[in-house]
Image (spheres, rainbow, N blue to C red):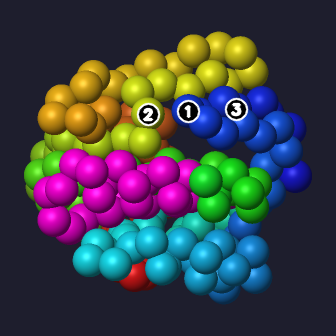
Amino acid sequence: MMMKSIVYGDYQCSQWNGVIGLNDPLFKVWLEKVKPYLEGYELWIYGGVIEDWLTFDLDATLIGPYDPKRINEVLNDIVRVSFEYGLFPDIKYSIDGKLFNWSEWERTGEYTTCKYAYYRPHMYVNSKLIDWGTLENDLWIGTRVWPMRKAIGKDHTYKDPIQIA
C-alpha cells in the first residue's frame, strides 16, 4: 500500500493499492467493474501493469467515437471505480486515436505527440497542484509527448499497449 493524498475532481483517496500484472486479482476485479462502462470504446493498457512490476497507477488510453458527453461519462465512471478500489487511474481518451508504441520508437527514434481528453484538468497530490488541461468542446484536453523522459535510457525493453476491452 502507498500513502499519498490525491484529490482528482470529485474523488479523493490517501491509501493506494498496488497491482502486479494483468493477472493480479485486484486488477481483474477492477477490470470487470469498469467493462460495463466501456461500451463502444476500446481500452488499451500499458506501463507498469503490463511490465509485471508493482505499480500503483493504471496507465491506459480509451479509443472510440468522438462524443464529448459520452467520453466524460466513461472517464468519470472509470475514475470513480478506480478510486473505490484504491487504484490510481492515469486513463485518458485519445482525441486523435493515437497510441504510443515502444517498438516503433525503438525502430525510428521519433517522438509521438498524443492529444488526450482527461476526466479533469488538474489534481492535487499531497496538496500540490498538478495542472495539464484546457477546456475544448466540453472536454479537458492536454497533450503528452512520448516516450516520457523518465523512461528513456533505462535498461528495459518496454511492451507496446495491449487492448484489454
Residue 137 to residue 31: above or below = above
Q: Is residue 58 magenta?
A: yes
Outermost residue, front direction? 69
Using residue 109 as the reference point, say whether residue 42 is left or right of it.
Answer: right
> Label 2 to label 3, Cα distance in Å?
13 Å
Residue 34: assigned label: none
Q: Is residue 157 visible?
A: no
Q: Which residue is mark 1?
A: 9
Q: Which residue is mark 2?
A: 120
Q: Nearer the viewer, mark 3 or mark 1?
A: 1
Q: Depth check: 99 or 127 in front?
A: 127
> Label 3 to label 1, Cα distance in Å?
10 Å
Q: Secondary structure at mark 1?
A: loop
Q: Is residue 16 magenta?
A: no
Using residue 44 as the reference point, say whether residue 19 is left or right of it.
Answer: right
Q: Nearer the viewer, mark 2 or mark 3?
A: 2
The 10 Å Cα crowd at callout 2, few under 14, some 14 to 19, many 20 or more, is many
Give the x, y percent position of residue 1. Answer: 87, 52
Using residue 112 as the reference point, say whether residue 23 is left or right of it.
Answer: right
Q: Which residue is mark 3?
A: 6
Picture quadrant of residue 38: bottom left
The residue sitting at 63% across, 61% down in the picture is 81
Q: Which residues are magenta?
A: 55-79
* Kind of residue at disc 1: Gly
* Kind of residue at disc 2: Arg
